Image (cartoon, helix red, strand yellow):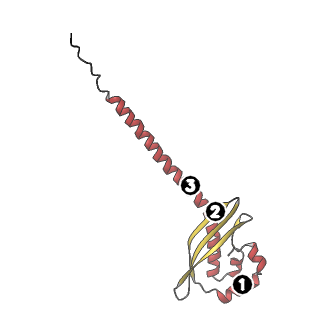
Amino acid sequence: MTYEPVMVPPKNTGTRRTVLIVIGVVLSLCCLGGIVGGFLFWNLAQEARGPARDSVDTFAGAMVQRDFATAYGQVCGQLRDQQSQADFVRQQSELFTATDYEIVGVNVVNRNGQVRGEATVRWVLPNGAGGTQLLNLVKEDGDWRVCT
């Protein structure tokens, strides 16, 4: 019986290196896709909340400046149907005392085609104390309106 040596194939390090390169490229593309997707999602959310935030800013700024006629223009039709501008101005002139505000957050949702929102506003009173108020928002004729 003759002895024949078993041939051991040489190690092919090129295949392993190629696989690792492909895996690295795929992982890099996945990470890049996640970053781009996250940015696009954030940008869409900002576009949805931006106009609602602007309406709340106009309303709250008018209230603090005691420009109640402008603030009345930012309320929804349901509230305007319940109270005239003159009554709103008179009531707010007597009761509203905040000297500053901060919009803490704005949230917009679309449920079954009905777009609604909420804004949290922190009012600052003359004595420096503050309180928060949740303002309900509705979209009427393409504009956001405060509908508390």
Residue neighbourhood size for the residue with mark 1, other residues' Cα within 10 Å, grouped as few (<14), some (14–19), many (≥20)? some
Residue 49, image x, y percentages: 61, 64
Q: Residue at x 75, y 64 (%)?
A: 141
Q: Residue at x 52, y 85 (%)?
A: 129
Q: Which mark is residue 109?
A: 2
Q: Is residue 127 left or right of residue 117?
A: left
Kindly report which numbered mark, 2 or 3, lies closer to the viewer in this rendering: 2
Give the structural element (helix, strand or loop) at label 1.
helix
Name the residue carrying label 3.
41
Residue 59, image x, y percentages: 65, 75
Give the structural element (helix, strand or loop) at label 3.
helix
| Quarter location, residue 50 | bottom right
- Mark 2 and mark 3: span between their CA atoms? 14 Å
Q: Which mark is residue 67?
A: none
Which amino acid lies under the numbered mark 2 shown in the image of this protein? Answer: Val
Q: Nearer the viewer, residue 34 or 1?
A: 1
Tell whether label 3 touches label 1 (CB within 8 Å): no
Residue 10, image x, y percentages: 28, 24
Q: Which mark is residue 89?
A: 1
Which amino acid lies under the numbered mark 3 shown in the image of this protein? Answer: Phe
Tell whether label 1 touches label 2 (CB within 8 Å): no
Q: Nearer the viewer, residue 7 or 3?
A: 3
Q: Nearer the viewer, residue 58 or 39?
A: 39
Residue neighbourhood size for the residue with mark 3, other residues' Cα within 10 Å, grouped as few (<14), some (14–19), many (≥20)? few
Q: Residue at x 68, y 77 (%)?
A: 71
Q: Is residue 119 left or right of residue 8?
A: right
Give the structural element (helix, strand or loop) at label 2.
strand
- Mark 2 and mark 1: span between their CA atoms? 31 Å
